[in-house]
Amino acid sequence: MADGEEKQRQFPEKKQIRQQTAQPKRRSKSWGDMKRYESLARNISDSILSGVLKFGDQLPSVRQASSSRGVSASTVFKAYYLLEAQGLIAARERQGYFVIASPRGMPPQPEAASQPAAESTTVDVSELVFKILESAGTREVVPFGSAFPSPLLFPTAALTRSMSAALPKQDPWSTVDYLTQGLPALRREIALRYLIDGQQVSPAEIVITNGALEALHLCLIAVTKPGDAVVIESPCFYGVLQTLERLCLKAISVTTHPSEGIDLAALEAALLLHRPTACWLMTNFQNPLGSSMPAEKKQALVELLAEHEVPLIEDDVYGELYYGQRRPLPAKAYDRRGLVMHCGSFSKCLAPGYRIGWALPGRQLQQVARLQLTSTLSASAPAQEALANYLARGRYDHHLRALRYKLASNQHLMTHAISRYFPAGTAATRPTGGYFMWLQLPSSVDALEIHRLALAQGISVAPGPIFSPQHGYGNCLRLNYGHLWDERTEAAAALLGRLIATQV
Ligand SMILES: Cc1ncc(COP(=O)(O)O)c(C=O)c1O
């Protein structure tokens, strides 16, 4: 649908359609109540769910659909946006919309928010996390438990060309001149990415780091001291728990909804009760749930934390991996007081081994830059040169569109495999970006035991207990669908389903 590409990006009602799908209606509309685009979308979704339109089928272009259905192009756009927001179709660059769902029943999505313990706790998860990660680290293992997407999904050759082109031109003094904050050309490219989303960021506000992990670490050190309490999500990325453990910080786990992120009422109660010194969250495509906070909720979060003068460390490493038309804004976009410390990375979306991330530390800029001086001094200059060169060539968005399409399709394949092979009572999140989904299995299932049994069969999974300081979520798994899906993967999903079924 080349004719519609530009229009798709600009179409104004899109946000409205997203909001509409984010809050499901209590009763389904009768045909009489429906607007034209809704009935067109219902028509198409019925064809998908009845199997007339199959996974991978291409939908007619906007022009064709508008003339064959006798409706305006804008009605077709709105119908396609609605279907896209419902996860039934996805756009492929310059080719149009394709079906990414199938008639088989989808597993239900988990509904209830988590209920973590209310007290603040010291953290002691490293041993368990290391044991589990070490066991799953070979390429012979089917990597459902991996934290990384497939390395084959990245433009390795183009990055190598950028490295070869950039290094001969490198000014030898640049390795000294740009210590700590990083290469100006790369900071400028990062600032441009913010600008695309309407965020005004100066390169001078950015500190380039060795991956997001260093950025997050430095931001946390900048605003806490040992013994302080930090608000985290429940469940949360185990890297958060390991960092708190290492820095002798206490964790306050706050109720988190599987699709909409942290619960603000619970957060407010925690702020009043525990007086934390920082809050560390993922507002987009949270690891492990895949949840994303709606825009209004992000704004309310920033206002709430500002009222309590609590800095927010925002981990946004998956922000570029959205399946819809636009990058969801980070909480940083609503920050007027410099209290949000936004951290990003190229590790998950462009260049995994380069170890280049960054922080936008707001009012802690100088402190974070100085801390980096005493940490790793700076990120690798050649890696920064290569990335700056690659980004300036203007191929990044092309790569991202292909990557997002792959991840959205793989999510469908994983969801389909779950509905086919996993026992009844399995619920799975359906994130709108990233490459993780969170499974709630029947309560009799022991995720650590499943991890052990699956690994013996060459399959890794990430068991729920590594995502909580209390080792909770004993019947949950995080599954990674960011790898190539082939017969081996399908067979592994079937075997995993059978292993789980033995415990039900
Ligand atoms: C949620 C989350 N944040 C941060 C990181 C670290 O990112 P980087 O590889 O850029 O250090 C990871 C890596 O797995 C992650 O999953």
Image (cartoon, helix red, strand yellow):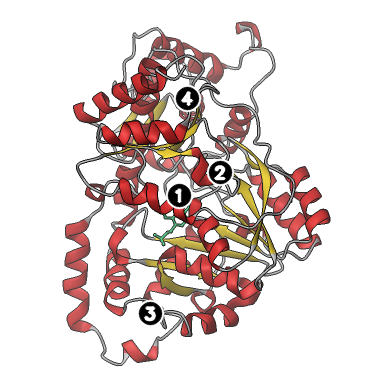
Label number found at residue 83? 4
Q: Is residue 193 visible to us here?
A: yes
Q: Give yes or no for contact between labels 2 and 4 (Cβ–Cβ under 8 Å).
A: no
Q: Earlier in the sequence, mark 2 or mark 4?
A: 4
Q: Earlier in the sequence, mark 4 or mark 1?
A: 4
Alpha carbon separation for disc pair 4 and 1: 41 Å
Q: Amino acid at mark 4?
A: Leu
Residue 89, by quadrant, is top left
Mark 1 close to ligand 1, CB under 8 Å: no
Whereabouts is ligand 1, in terms of quadrant? bottom left
- Report the mark closest to the observer, 3 or 1: 1
Q: Which residue is mark 2?
A: 471
Q: Amino acid at mark 3?
A: Leu
- Report the mark closest to the observer, 3 or 2: 2
Label number found at residue 128? 1
Q: Earlier in the sequence, mark 3 or mark 1?
A: 1
Alpha carbon separation for disc pair 4 and 3: 42 Å
Per the image, label 2 sits on a secondary structure element best described as: loop
| Viewer-proximal residue among 7 and 67 | 7
Q: Which residue is mark 3?
A: 183
